[in-house]
Image (spheres, rainbow, N blue to C red):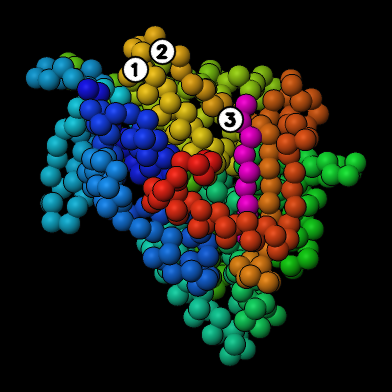
Amino acid sequence: MARVVILGAGIAGHTAALHLRRMLGKQHEIVVVSPNSKWNWIPSNIWVGVGKMASDQVVFPLAPIYRRKGIGFHQALATTIFPEGTAEDERPQVEVSSTAPGSQGQTERLWYDYLINATGPKLNFAATPGLGPDGNSLSVCTASHAAETSKEFDALVEQMRAGEKKTIVIGTGHGMCTCEGAAFEYTFNVEHELREKGVRDNAEVVYLSNEYELGDFGVGGMSFTQMGFTTSSKTWTESLFRERGVKAILRAHVQKVEPGTVHYEQLDGSEHSLDFDFAMLLPPFKGADMKAYDRAGADITDRLFAPNGLTKVDADYTPKPYEEWSADDWPTTYRNPSYPNIFAPGIAFAPPHPISVPRKSPNGTVITPAPPRTGMPSGIMAKTVALTIKDLIAKGDQAHAHTASMARMGAACVASAGNGFTRGSAAAMTMFPVVPDWKKYPGTGRDQKGTSGEIGLAGHWIKAMLHYLFIYKAKARPFWFLIPE
């Protein structure tokens, strides 16, 4: 009998848990640890944030799903890993602190044969003074954040209906953020709703981003070839901004957010202030705050985690100039090199470097998007890790590890630009691979046959369909596994 403990129940953790339960016999134990009692389809939070969906349409309780599937569930926060066990118990263990109502933070240790760290990101609002719902800006990072943001948006619309002029700022709240796609989506959903509600003329909509140019999205931009014509995601995105009358401020690092004012530095070193009436600014990510100790009690946190708290895996972390970056730097199996029974798919793994070109201001401020690892890539990585663990259990330590490098992986993204069955739109994009391979695809870094972009009403229908498909999949309804990651 083997026990697999999974930390986190987001896209990566939940996907791994369901696939492992499907693949492994009942004699093997699957245990999920998550501080949250509910699963959230995060891509639809942007619709909650403009009042087009209720928060209960994007979340559901995890415990009933896990009871039905025979998966153990602990509503708890993982705090410490003992990958070598302890003097009292030689089995590898993880210490967790309960977050269930009435538990008063009780701790326990769970032993494991295999550990999947799928804790995802810690929303690092503290990286920018005044950023976030506890500060002076709004968020759509969680369903509850998005519901509160929707209330603020409704109040703003009523003020505009009364004839007041308003400035709306949406974007990234730090120079190293990684959610440019979500900021883009929320910007155009807000702009769309303003038009639908008849108050667009009373609003200036400003997109504030750490991207070097529009269309970067943290992946260095893309080139599309359609009908013999090649265009860039920059040109494609700029045309949408012009069409919708959205102002873009790029190459920006938010220094602090005061009530009604955001202060930012740009890549040229200049500093600016922008007054706002409504600001939704996304935070940078960091890893979960976990420690690690060896059997003797020595701190080995740096063997498992990078300084930002993300888990070290089979990537090449050797510092090297941008010109020497390679597709081969990226991990393939998501195993920790020191402890190969520990895996970290999705946002939890530490990338070797950004995908976008690294840049600093003359003041030394890093203003470069961090690489996205959400949605489709997270699901693919999680299933790949599940397949590897299944084979390790069946065949032993010499079993072949399955691979899913982001430099060999394609991805599809549907970015909403406004919700509505007949008047909505979305940008549907594909790229192959996610991480450019300049040796294999000189000039663009990606296969032009697998990289495309198109915007329109059909994209919105696809986005809406995916919402319901992935809720169905996450609830492990009949034949859920036939829906691809």
Lower sequence index among marks 3 and 2: 2
- Residue ID at (27%, 34%): 30
With respect to residue 205, does 17 lie above or below?
Answer: above
Q: Nearer the viewer, residue 236 or 413?
A: 413
Q: Is residue 366 left or right of residue 429?
A: left
Dominant SS of magenta comes to strand
Residue 276 forms part of the magenta stretch: no
Q: CA distance from mark 2 to mark 1?
A: 8 Å
Q: Is residue 441 left or right of residue 270?
A: right
Q: Is residue 470 left or right of residue 207?
A: left
Check the image and name the residue furthest to the top.
Answer: 398
Q: Which residues are magenta?
A: 408-417
Indicate the position of residue 238 as horizontal and vertical percent values: 77, 55
Q: Secondary structure at mark 3?
A: loop
Q: Secondary structure at mark 2?
A: loop
Indicate the position of residue 312 as horizontal and vertical percent values: 42, 25
Looking at the image, do the residues carrying marks 2 and 1 touch, with CB atoms under 8 Å apart?
Answer: yes
Name which residue type carries label 3.
Met
With respect to residue 4, does 73 lie above or below?
Answer: below
Indicate the position of residue 148 as horizontal and vertical percent values: 42, 69
The label on residue 406 is 3
Check the image and name the residue furthest to the front.
Answer: 478
Quarter assignment of residue 232: top right
The label on residue 399 is 2
Quarter assignment of residue 436: top right
Total marks placed:
3
Name which residue type carries label 1.
Ala
